[in-house]
Amino acid sequence: VLLDNNFNIIVRAIERGRITFNNIRKVILYLVTDSFTEIILIGGAVILGFPLPILPVQILWIKLAESAAPAMALAFDEVNENVMKEPPRKKGEAIVNKSMKKLIIFYALIMDLTLFGMFYIFWKIADNFNLARTMVFIGLGLSSFFYIFAVRGLKISVLKINPFSNKLLLLSVGLGFTMLLVAIYVPFFNTVLH
């Protein structure tokens, strides 16, 4: 809706629309990658005949800590990746494009191999099953917190983005990290979450 005859309003509206579309892509990339990681982790354990490396109640806690507030904060990220220099998107372009699908699969496989390795080492070599499950819980939670900063830039390097430019994201990740610590060290939550 044009409030006046100023052409700059149209340009700013297009820029805002492109930033919003990119933020939607970032949130989807973040949430789908985390979910895919958990699916492979649980499915892989079942296929290999391992006990579950993480329990459903632990996944719910991680989802509560990692997904809710950080994903919302990511939705309002102000990273401008020179969106006005990009050509217009094709009319039927999917929200999740090929490069995003590759990134989802790549990251999920790397994380799952790491988490399976940690689980096996602490379960079989250190002979401590509870510690193995705790390490997977911590690894899954921490990886999500680091990954959210990586997805802030779809087309630019994360090293070029000021990590302190989204204070809401920092606050939500800090809250999520605190919730992870509470789950591990507060006796009531420690018992409930096994």
Image: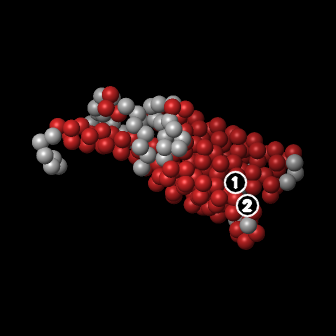
**Tally of numbered tags:** 2
Describe the colour scheme in one phrase.
secondary structure
Binning the other alpha carbons within 10 Å of mark 2 as few (below 14), some (14 to 19) or many (20 upward) gives some
Marks 1/2 in contact by CB < 8 Å: the verdict is: yes
Q: In which quarter of the image is the C terminus?
A: bottom right
Q: What kind of element bears circle 1?
A: helix
Q: Amino acid type of disc 1?
A: Phe
Rendering quarter of residue 184: bottom right
Binning the other alpha carbons within 10 Å of mark 1 as few (below 14), some (14 to 19) or many (20 upward) gives many
Residue 185 appears at what percent x and percent y?
Answer: 75, 63
Residue 149 appears at what percent x and percent y?
Answer: 55, 42
Query: In the displayed image of the protein, which residue is found farthest to the left?
Result: 5
Rendering quarter of residue 111: top right
Badge number at residue 137: 1
Check the image and report above or below for 56 versus 168. Answer: below
Q: Which of the marked residues, 1 or 2, is nearer the chain's N terminus? A: 1
**With 59 as the anchor, is 115 left or right in this view?**
right
**What residue is rendered at 60% in x and 54% in y?**
174
Task: Judge depth for marks 1 and 2 and give the one in front.
Answer: 2
Q: Amino acid type of disc 2?
A: Ile
Q: Which residue is at the front of the view, 77 or 162?
A: 162
C-alpha distance separating marks 1 and 2 = 9 Å
**What residue is rendered at 55% in x and 54% in y?**
171
**What residue is rendered at 51% in x and 57% in y?**
69
Q: Is residue 27 visible?
A: no
Check the image and report above or below for 11 versus 139. Answer: above
Residue 169 appears at what percent x and percent y?
Answer: 51, 50
Residue 6 appears at what percent x and percent y?
Answer: 15, 40
Q: Which residue is at the front of the view, 79 or 190?
A: 79
**With 32 as the anchor, is 43 left or right in this view?**
right
Identify residue for label 2: 184
Q: Which residue is at the front of the view, 154 or 3?
A: 3
